Image (cartoon, grey):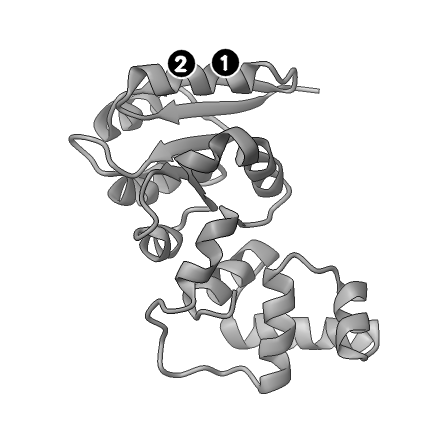
Amino acid sequence: MDAYKIVLADDHALFRQGLRRLIEDVAELEVVGEACDGMELLKLLDAIVPDMVILDISMPNLRGLEAIGKVKMKCPDAKVLILSMHREYIYHAMSAGADGYLLKEDADRELFSAIDNIREGRVFLSPRCAGDLIGSRVQSLDPLSGREKEVLKLIAGGKANKEIADILFISIRTVETHRANIMTKTKLKNTADLVRYAIQRGYA
């Protein structure tokens, strides 16, 4: 099986080196490039197509928040994991299209959980960050019913259809119907998009 290719973008060389050593201790992961700022990252992506970019929010020349969209334009299939010391940018990063948000202080414990979750199509947040999103600004109009919001909240919490059915005392078929209705109403296409939607509205 081909290695999962990762690019690191952080303006602190020692931190990048430490992160690279951690990642390359795992046989199936490979760091294929490093950048010290946002502009260098974009140039690097002209030559390399990674599976994931691990990106710092605070970088010179092009900040991480602005870089997220540009990374997605250059490499539409690449996942973006934000790695930051700052909790206050979570909402903006996820709204910009990030697939995960990991605090640097949690990196030693949660890095591989973040990578694995994102590889499998889920959104990852540092555990201590989830509550920060509850007070985030949300759009005033919401097309979802109360039950659909309950289902969405459980989806965002990583629950499978059977687990949701057991928690809400409904059938799996009913869960599937609610999930389909949520995706139709929100015009979203996959679970990662649903999780991001839930985060933006403060359900997760």
Residue 125, horizontal then vertical, whole percent: 50, 49
The residue sitting at 60% across, 57% down in the picture is 191
Residue 142, horizontal then vertical, whole percent: 45, 82
Residue 90, horizontal then vertical, whole percent: 36, 52
Specify the label residue 21 is tagged with: 1
**Label 1's element?**
helix
Apparent side of residue 190 relative to residue 73 in the rendered image (left or right): right
Quadrant of residue 43 within the rendered picture: top left
Is the residue 1 above or below the residue 187 in the image? Answer: above
The residue sitting at 40% across, 24% down in the picture is 8
Looking at the rendering, in which quadrant would you find the N terminus?
Answer: top right
Q: Which residue type does callout 1 highlight?
A: Arg
Apparent side of residue 30 relative to residue 61 in the rendered image (left or right): right
Whether pointer 1 and pointer 2 mark residues with C-beta atoms closer than 8 Å, the reply is: yes
**Label 2's element?**
helix
Question: How many angstroms separate mark 1 from mark 2 (CA)?
Answer: 6 Å
Apparent side of residue 145 relative to residue 128 in the rendered image (left or right): right
Residue position marked by numbered label 2 in the rendering: 17
Is the residue 82 above or below the residue 35 in the image? Answer: below
Residue 43 in view: yes
Label 2: how many Cα within 10 Å (few below 14, some 14–19, many 20+): few
Is the residue 25 above or below the residue 101 in the image? Answer: above
Residue 125 in view: no
Is the residue 106 above or below the residue 158 in the image? Answer: above
